[in-house]
Image (spheres, rainbow, N blue to C red):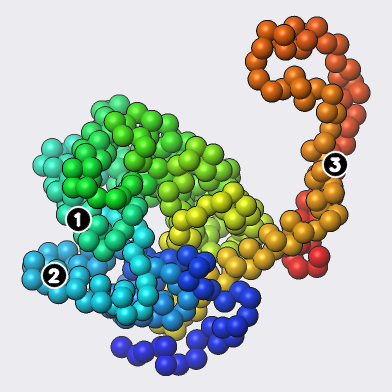
Amino acid sequence: MTDLLNKPLANEAASDQYAPKKEDKFTFGLWTVGNRGRDPFGDFVRPALDPVYTVKTLAGLGAYGVTFHDDDLVPFGSSLAERDRIVKEFKQALDDYGMIVPMATTNLFFHPVFKDGAFTAVDPAVRAYSLQKTMRAIDLGAELGAKTYVFWGGREGVDAEASKDPTIALKRMREALNFLCRYVKDQGYDIKFAMEPKPNEPRSDTYLPTVGHMLAFIYTLDYPEMVGLNPEVAHENMAGLNFTHGVAQALEAGKLFHIDLNDQKGPRYDQDLRFGSESIKNNFFLVKLLEEKGYSGPRHFDAHAYRTEDEQGVWDFALGCMRTYNMFKEKVKRFAADKEIQGLLAEINGGDQTFQGLLNGYTPETVQKLKGYDFNIDQLATRGYQYEKLDQLTIEVILGVR
């Protein structure tokens, strides 16, 4: 395997303001840069990447950490001795290159045994095996220092609607999460769970398909304080939803435990494109939300290089994700410092402050005042809100002309 760190990468200008640094908390999954370019219509185009080599190369690009499914690190079916050797070498690489493992997860979707799902499969043996595999993977994540454990229900859904009672499927999902929360507590692990919604693919319909669905489900669990969300850009966009609004809902609820960044061309199949490569305006507002509302977790890129790329292209892709995030972050600062924009926002959000005192919560006195007031709705309806101007100024900041 060629050591590309000894060759010029796209990060030659390491001193520029957009160059990634450890404090940016950028992370990648082994499966992201390790994606070999296979799709439903074509076979692999790139060789497999060794996890130790991946840690070394990502560290050289300025990444903060690396994540994995259990099978990404320890190949499915490995012996105990082989498992221990791989984990030991991986730990050493993390120490050598100053990287951490902030998140881990379980592959409950690739092997044919999961063709009907894992925790919601109709076969009790499959559900039991899924718990076993997940407990072992949680042990591995804890051993490597992961603080967040993600659950993506890749095949937790249906193709034939008659095959499952959805109320029973949700009950089985709840039982599995409750069981695994108890397991983490009993083992004394410092780990929280983050559920990852997706509306479809690879199943026709996936249970708990959006941020809102999962947020409601979390509060039905025995330990809701242990469970949050890991929303992904492409997944909400697949349903035609506003991802930034979904993230805001998770943030406002104190449930944004992790986030997956990538990009997507509309409501199609899950594309996992390089972050910021398509939805520039939407991703500007996403970064603005994360940076201004105090999200302190990893900025995790769950994306992969185009199938056209060789290994060099993989590292160009990884560096591009991080640099583009930092470019958006700089644009967010410009937006906040722009006097015309901030003045316009103050004017827009000012309005008639006469009524602000009546909007601070319920009291019987407030009820009487509101019910008795004669609003001049015709006058209220004449107001122009200057949103066209605001949006144009925003575009000018994003495009770099302000």
The three-letter code of the residue at mark 2 reads: Asp
Horizontally, residue 391 falls left or right of residue 171, namely right
Q: How many marks?
A: 3
The three-letter code of the residue at mark 1 reads: Asp
Q: Which mark is residue 139?
A: 1
Please tell me whether residue 271 is drawn above or below residue 345 in the rendered image.
below
Q: Along the polypeptide, which appears first: circle 3 or circle 1?
A: 1
Horizontally, residue 172 falls left or right of residue 268, namely left
- Percent across and percent down for residue 348 are 82, 40
Nearer to me, 239 or 1: 1
Q: Secondary structure at mark 1?
A: helix
Pointer 3: what residue? 347
Residue for point 45% across, 72% down: 63
- Percent across and percent down for residue 365 are 72, 8
Q: Secondary structure at mark 2?
A: helix
Structural distance between the alpha carbons of marks 2 and 3: 62 Å
Q: Along the polypeptide, which appears first: circle 2 or circle 1?
A: 2
